[in-house]
Image (spheres, rainbow, N blue to C red):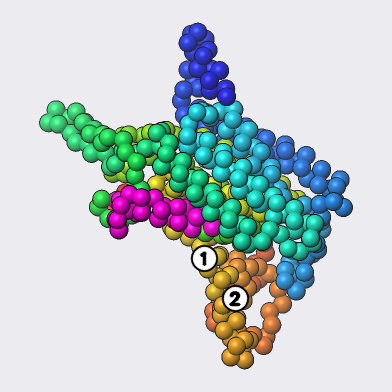
Amino acid sequence: MLYYVFRYFEKLDIPGSGLWSYISFRSVMAFLIAMVLSWLIGKWFITFMHNNRTRFEEKKFDVSIDPVAAKHKYTPSMGGIVIIAAVLIACLLFGRLRNIYLLLMIGTTIWLGVTGFIDDYLKIKRSKNGLAPSWKLISQLGLGIIVALTLYLSPDAVIHENIVSQRTKSGTEIVHKSEPVKSTITTIPFVKSHNFDYSWLGSKQIGWCVFVIVTVFFIMLTSNGINLNDGVDGMAAGNSAIIFVALGIFAYVSSHIGFASYLNIMYIPGAQELVVYTFAMIGALIGFLWHNTHPAKVYMGDTGSLSIGGVIAVLALIIHKEIMLFFLCGLLIIELASSKLQTLYSIWGTKHGRKQRLIKRAPFHDAFRAGYNFDPTIKYKFPWCSGDDEDERVTVHFWIISILLAAFTVILLKVR
């Protein structure tokens, strides 16, 4: 919104108006505003939820399930509203609202935010069950179709396949830019061409159908991963902020013809507006951490985790870097896999008359947390997790792992 106002001021030769044409300036402003708004809205939200505790209190924690969290006093959920509000306001103020990619990210944030809010609200009203898994799947499937159709039909959603650059004898660099095309190509590491096309099995129509399936898969993967990672104060918000830093770098280099040429990746004009979105999200998450660090005064709930996880996937899909999420979101994948495998291994053991688990607690981070009384009659396949670390220690350790994964993933852009 302000972008168009100051672009008009620039035509009137008002000093300083030209700053708004720089993506770096608008991104930093979006970061600062989102961080301050998240902090301020968070304070109001916590007060509001405590004043309406009888209407919005979820059922008390089950000591047998989570004795650590059960010791906490009442902590309101649905804090994802704070993050979403801060991100949307910052993007509306500093983004180019005619940009198809930014509009798609705003739509995704609202779509999954509403889905998560309904889930959280039903948990409060029903005191146990939230939105049925089938309805979540329908929501994610619908979003996947919308994302794919938007990228397929919008004339602005195009890419330039890998840019070729060369230097003349005089030292002048010549960049050969391909024609803009609609494509189901995605970036993959470790290979020279850096590309993989979903339509390699058949026509482009088949490729777009595969793209819809891939979209839904990654939305489910990252959404459920963030949801499981949100089990310790500050962990999910911190890990998500780190992931968005890497995605912001991907968005910037993909939108810059020089960096795209150097890294031998596809050039995506217009993707620079995604940098504004990622900076806004990082700022909102840091502002939210002010209230969410141990001891947490508010939880993000499914309103936050479903939305944050979904936008991670959609943002990566827009810039054709979704395969890189297997490395960037490796910690989330481990969390999700540990939970599913723990359940399957336990069921298999029960059928054979044995009490067994893969690790002491699932998801993965719970195996390190202090406060659990482990059953000595259960046989653990991997009993090496001590289970004696305080929540703050576990959170910081997982942040460090996320930083290492993010750095490794960024480096992979040059590894081929």
State the image coordinates of residue 406 (x, y, percent, origin top left). 46, 52
In the displayed orientation, state which residue is furthest to the bottom: 353
Q: Amino acid at mark 1?
A: Ile
**Is 302 displayed left or right of 70 in the figure?**
left
In whole angstroms, how far apart are the C-alphas of marks 1 and 2? 14 Å
Viewer can see residue 73: yes
Q: Are marks 1 and 2 in contact (CB under 8 Å)?
A: no
Give the secondary structure at mark 2.
Answer: helix
Image spot of residue 367 (x, y percent): 61, 71
* Residue occupying image coordinates x 50% and y 45%: 146
Q: Quick check: can you spot residue 263?
A: no
Q: Please name the residue that numbered disc 1 is placed on.
A: 334
Looking at the picture, tell me which residue is in the foreground, 170 or 99: 99
Left or right, 361 with reference to 18: right
Looking at the image, residue 224 lies above or below residue 270: below
| Outermost residue, left side | 169
Q: Main secondary structure of the magenta part?
A: helix
Residue at x 47% of width, y 10% of height: 11
Image vertical order of residue 192 relative to residue 170, above or below: below
The segment highlighted magenta reads 194-220
Q: What residue do we see at 58% from left, 70% from top?
A: 339
Residue 400 image position (x, y, % from top left): 53, 56
Q: Disc 2 residue type? A: Thr
Q: Report which residue position mark 2 lands on.
A: 343
Q: Sequence-wise, which precedes: disc 1 or disc 2? A: 1
Q: Tell me, yes or no, whether the highlighted magenta stretch contains residue 266.
A: no
The relative height of residue 132 versus residue 361 in the rendered view (above or below) is: above
Foreground mark, 1 or 2, reads 2
As rendered, which of 347 and 211 lies closer to the eye?
211
Indicate yes or no whether the magenta region holds residue 218.
Answer: yes
- Graded by Cα atoms within 10 Å as few (under 14), some (14 to 19) or many (20 or more), the crowding at tag 1 reads some
Indicate the position of residue 75 as horizontal and vertical percent values: 78, 54
